[in-house]
Image (cartoon, rainbow, N blue to C red):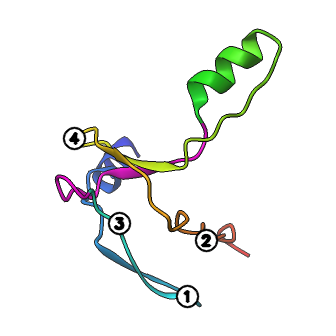
Amino acid sequence: MFELAHEILSQPIPEELEVEGVGNYRQPRCPVCDSLEIAFEGLNEAVAYASAWLGVPLTLHDRGWRCRACGHSWEDETPPPATVDVPPAGN
């Protein structure tokens, strides 16, 4: 089981995906290093967790992208890609 999980997680990020009912989805890239290893950051977790610990929960949002390869951060006017609900297997 571990070997199968490791094999799946070791696969490269696809540049394009076919999303049923939507069409082709093209993975965004870092504008600096062209990496596909990027993530959309919607919540400033450090502030949210620290403020919750102090008993005054604040939810500050960073609406931007961060490259995990080079560390570059940028804002994009387009919203993050919508998540696709996948029904559980066997339904």
Of residues 10 and 5, which is closer to you in this image? 10
Labelled pair 2, 1 in contact (Cβ < 8 Å): yes
The quarter in which the C terminus is drawn is bottom right
Labelled pair 3, 2 in contact (Cβ < 8 Å): no
Residue tagged 2:
84
Query: Where 31 falls versus 39 (above or below)?
Result: below
Query: Where 59 falls versus 22 (above or below)?
Result: above
Q: Callout 1: helix, strand or loop?
A: loop
* Magenta region: 31-43
Residue tagged 4:
70
User: Could you tell me residue 46's position as x and y percent?
Assistant: 57, 23
Of residues 41 and 83, which is closer to you in this image? 41
Query: Where 72 falls versus 37 (above or below)?
Result: above
N-terminal label among 3 and 2: 3
Q: Residues within 10 Å of mark 3 (few under 14, many from 20)?
A: some
N-terminal label among 4 and 2: 4
Residue tagged 1:
22
The extreme left residue here reads 33
- In screen coordinates, is 55 left or right of 38? right
N-terminal label among 1 and 3: 1
